[in-house]
Image (tube, grey):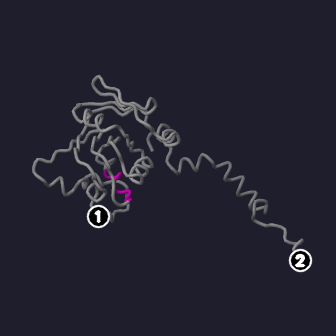
Amino acid sequence: MQAIKTITGPVSVLDRTDVDTDQIMPKQFLKRVERTGFGEFLFYDWAKQPGWDLPHNPILVTGRNFGCGSSREHAPWGLQDYGFKAVVAPSFADIFASNCTKIGLLPVTLSENEVKALMQADEAEIDLEAQEVRFGDTVARFEIDPETKHRLFNGLDDIALTLAQEDAIAAYEAERERGGWGGGADTTALR
């Protein structure tokens, strides 16, 4: 997973609320086993409507309750494959936001007014370390769980976090083989 320090660039706007994961990535495209190639199916039904325009920019700004519905990982995969590196909204479904952070897609929660102002901006910069979104003369602060921030800032997915504990895992396994940690308790005193 790529580390996130700052995300800078043009803003794409999807001014809709309660966008669920089936709208983001319809169910007929969930049969794929790779994590790539989903971008072409993003907002599949909406993309057929006249006047639909969602540029491939690094930052998506959208309405409240984004990513509600089912817990499918394919929705964040599609957003990332489309080119988005961050999604800014007043609120997210919890599981959706968690799925985003597991692949290095940054969900940023700002107030309704800040999101509306950002929708009017051409470009923005999201600084993960400072926890700020900067656009025009505005600086909007956002909150993020410290552990999630650490993982994103350092590019650590679940596998990388596990591999960082390789020595402790090896020590545990060696001790377990010797019967030290719950593997072979002495039961002679029970007889």
Compared to residue 135, the image places residue 71 above or below, namely: below
How many marks the image carries: the answer is 2
- How many C-alpha atoms fall within 10 Å of the one at disc 1: few (<14), some, or many (≥20)? few
**Disc 2 marks which residue?**
191
Compared to residue 163, the image places residue 113 above or below, namely: above
**Disc 1 marks which residue?**
27
Residue 1's spot in the image, x, y percent?
45, 45
- Give the residues drawn in magenta, as a range: 71-78
Residue located 89% across and 71% down the image: 189
Compared to residue 43, the image places residue 84 above or below, namely: above
Residue 38's spot in the image, x, y percent?
30, 55
Q: Is residue 161 left or right of residue 99?
A: right
Pointer 1 and pointer 2: residues touching (CB < 8 Å)?
no
Residue located 49% across and 43% down the image: 148
Residue 114's spot in the image, x, y percent?
30, 34
Residue located 40% across and 49% down the image: 97
Q: Is residue 151 left or right of residue 38?
A: right
Compared to residue 100, the image places residue 30 above or below, namely: below
The part of the image, by quadrant, that contains residue 135 is top left
- How many C-alpha atoms fall within 10 Å of the one at disc 2: few (<14), some, or many (≥20)? few
Per the image, label 2 sits on a secondary structure element best described as loop
Q: Judge by depth and name the residue closer to the eye, 53 or 143.
A: 143
**Amino acid at dot 1:** Lys
